[in-house]
Image (tube, rainbow, N blue to C red):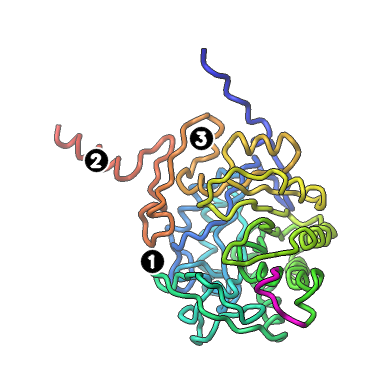
Amino acid sequence: MNPVTPRLDHLFRPLTLGNLNLPNRIIMGPMSRYRCRLDGTATDAVAQHFADRASAGLLICEPGYVHPSGRLGAESGGMADSTHVRSWKRVTDAVHERGGRIFMQLIHGGRVSAPELQADGGLPWAPSAVAARDDRVRVEPNHYGAAGTPRAMSRADIATIVESFAAATERAHEAGFDGVELHGGNGYLVHQFLSSNVNRRGDEYGGSVANRCRLILDLVDAMVAKFGPEYVGVKLTPVTSHHEVVVDDRDQMYDHLLRQLDTHADLAYLSVQSTMGFLETAPPPIDVFLYARERYSGTLLAAANLDRYSGEGLLASGTADAAVYGRRFIANPDLVGRFSGGHQENLVDWDTAILSGESGYNDYPTIHRASPLAECAERLAESDR
């Protein structure tokens, strides 16, 4: 007797998210794939990549740095100038032509950068001049170097960053994005300000929990002021210490921050990630999402190492409103169709996941299409018959 396949009723329910009506609750999460040009502009391959995944309820594309000082690595995306706008407009057009919806994640790397990535060859910016011991940064395509010791940001630098996030929100809107996500986690600049080990400031942006939350709340206000709260989502990673960023007073920090964000409960969403990233294989600690749900009353996205059934379970329990998938979308552009039809998923080729070039990017097979290499081999075999 064959086992009964559990129904995925909740994953396929529509959801109103900000000003958007999503046809399903399967969200493609943002992932740095390093397929942009060196200047942060998107290529035709990037447009194809997201268009191929447009059946997701929402696409949240790879992070775009908001200021030249915030580059994450060679071939990372940008939203810092007009050339970025023009290139990413081709991406959003391609997604919208397929009937999809797409947000851009906005980011500043902070100390997760290197002098080689700075326009002036200077030091990366950070809350304080505290180096990560073992952090490596992609300084050239497929080549990594030491991040080094950053320089402490002045109040003028902080004001520049707030304005840069606001300006990048405007640029994203001009480029056709349906919204933007503020990245507040995974060891990048905003998370560095929240931290207790990287942020050693003695001014209004350091010390107490309220002071260390000041930057992220300033950014939310500046971004919301452009097109309203429905255009802005926020991502947090409360349980991670990525890039050696630590929050020792985690409970107090996130209790305060989530309650402050709840005063902006008409934001498009709050996304909470419970893992270190798409390389982690640990199951999701559901209590992280329950913790957020108790303190934030708006739309909640759950990002973890979810499969179709754990995602369905989170939604069915009311713990989250939508499920965010990362690695599964790398190898399965038609993940939504695979979920709905119960089809087997492709496995990720980790050797090419963040490797420059076409391999491992747009060449995974779909339910109805073999991989380009397989198609070529089949044609050659037919010609030999």
Does the image show residue 170? Answer: no
Name the foreground residue: 196 vs 15: 196
Q: Which residue is mark 2?
A: 377
Is tag 3's residue or tag 2's residue first in the polypeptide sequence? 3
Find residue 225 and report its image quarter.
bottom right
- What is the CA distance from the residue labelled 3 to the residue labelled 2? 25 Å
Place of residue 181 in the rendered image (x, y in percent of width and height, measured from the top left): 66, 60
Q: Secondary structure at mark 3?
A: helix
Q: For the residue marked with disc 3, what is the amino acid?
A: Arg
Q: Main secondary structure of the magenta part?
A: loop
Q: Residues within 10 Å of mark 1 (few under 14, many from 20)?
A: few
Q: Residue furthest left?
A: 384
Find residue 212 and report its image quarter.
bottom right
**In the picture provided, is 140 more to the left or to the right than 276?**
left
Place of residue 128 in the rendered image (x, y in percent of width and height, measured from the top left): 65, 80
Place of residue 294 in the rendered image (x, y in percent of width and height, measured from the top left): 82, 48
Q: Residue furthest top?
A: 1
Q: For the residue marked with disc 1, what is the amino acid?
A: Asn
Q: Which residue is mark 3?
A: 338
Per the rendered image, the range of residues in magenta is 195-202
Q: Is residue 69 placed above or below 262 in the rendered structure?
A: below
Is tag 2's residue or tag 1's residue first in the polypeptide sequence? 1
Place of residue 103 in the rendered image (x, y in percent of width and height, measured from the top left): 62, 57
